[in-house]
Image: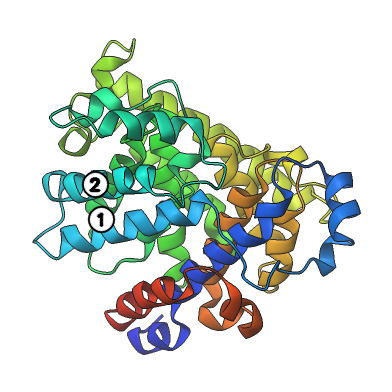
Amino acid sequence: MTPTTLMTKRPATGSLLGLALGDALGFPTEFNDVPAILAKCGPWREMELPGPVAYITDDTQMALAVARGLSAATGRGTLDAALFEPPLRQEFVDWYRSPENNRAPGNTCLRACDLLTTEGRAWQDASQLGSKGCGANMRVTPLGLVPGLSGEQRAGAAQLQAALTHGHPTALAASDLTAHAVFLLAGGADPTGLVGQLRSYALENRTRYREDWLGDLWRRSQDPYPEHFITRGWDECLAVLERLAAAVRTVNPETDPCLATGAGWIAEEALATALLCFLLFVDEPVLALRRAACTSGDSDSIAALAGAFAGAHLGADAWPEEWVRRVEHRDELTAFGTEWDSRL
């Protein structure tokens, strides 16, 4: 896809808006099973965005925190861990202290961000190594969209932003994969080959511990060496990608996607189930969001990631203007998207 085509498509704007719209659509249905959602919202194919203001959750709040931290870091030089960690940490602490942090945030994020408030504490000592919750990758979309990063920078920064709160190796690998999927789709990758590309990427990186980004995080675990630590995460992601590949071929779109690829409370399942919703409705992005929001699992996170994938693939025009007008933080989301799209 040529730069002119990408600018016309505006994948960064489409992806960020899709993330927020999915988040807002799934906000009222999180913690409900499918029968309860249908009783509340009516047929899933007709679900409407709540309003008049479509409120987002901590998923979009933290994605914006990543975007702000990334913007601050890249404005100071070539992105690396030393430049990225301080502004990102500050953004996470600011989110933790914000009065708007009242959208059912995850316990792992709350615990880790509380520890990050202590001046002088190494971020590795705040990271929750036992957690691979979807909070690690619900917020990583900006790393797949910002232009000018090398593959090494994108992967390292994606893992670092996860690790500040979620230190489990699967959280790191799933975040890396999520950012890579957004990057591929924004660049024009054919969705029919996406699962295979992600599997190849996982195999290529399976034993690679990114010490320049993660430091000695692995030493807090029970693993004997860093490669052993990170391989555990990639292997869990490879297993869920196998389930996803089978589901894309066999799942009936009328059934709950969580039954095939997981409820999405953990990072690798959030990735897989969001991708499944996107791939079931590649050319119908609003239906992809509705299917993701009408699930028995972590509906807002699944729908947020499905929207990020669909928007990266189809661009800003994928979304109904009436929905875009009502989504919370529209102006800031659009500002980041417009800036990044203009630099393609």
Q: Residues within 10 Å of mark 1 (few under 14, many from 20)?
A: many
Q: How many marks?
A: 2
Q: Which mark is residue 90?
A: 2
**Left or right, residue 53 beside residue 194:** right
The answer to whether the residue labelled 2 contacts the one labelled 1, judged by CB atoms less than 8 Å apart, is yes
In the displayed structure, would residue 31 be above or below residue 294?
above
Marks 2 and 1 sit apart, C-alpha to C-alpha, by: 8 Å
Locate residue 22: give its quadrant.
Answer: bottom right
Tell me where residue 78 appears, x and y as whole percent: 11, 59
For image coordinates 76% across by 69% down, the residue present is 48
Numbered label attached to residue 244: none
Amino acid at circle 2 = Gln
Report which quarter residue 311 is drawn in: bottom right
- Residue 117 picture location, percent across and down: 25, 34
Q: Earlier in the sequence, mark 2 or mark 1?
A: 1
Return the residue nearer the eye: 344 or 24. 24
Using the image as rendered, state which of residue 47 and residue 50 is in the foreground: 50
- Residue at the disc numbered 1: 69
Q: Categorize mark 2 by other alpha carbons within 10 Å: few (<14), some (14-19), many (20+).
A: some
Q: Of tags 2 and 1, which is closer to the observer? A: 2
- What secondary structure is found at the residue carrying circle 1? helix
Residue in the picture at 18% in, 28% down: 122
Q: How is the image coloured?
A: rainbow
Q: Residue at x 40, y 62 (%)?
A: 183
Q: Is residue 100 above or below residue 96?
A: below
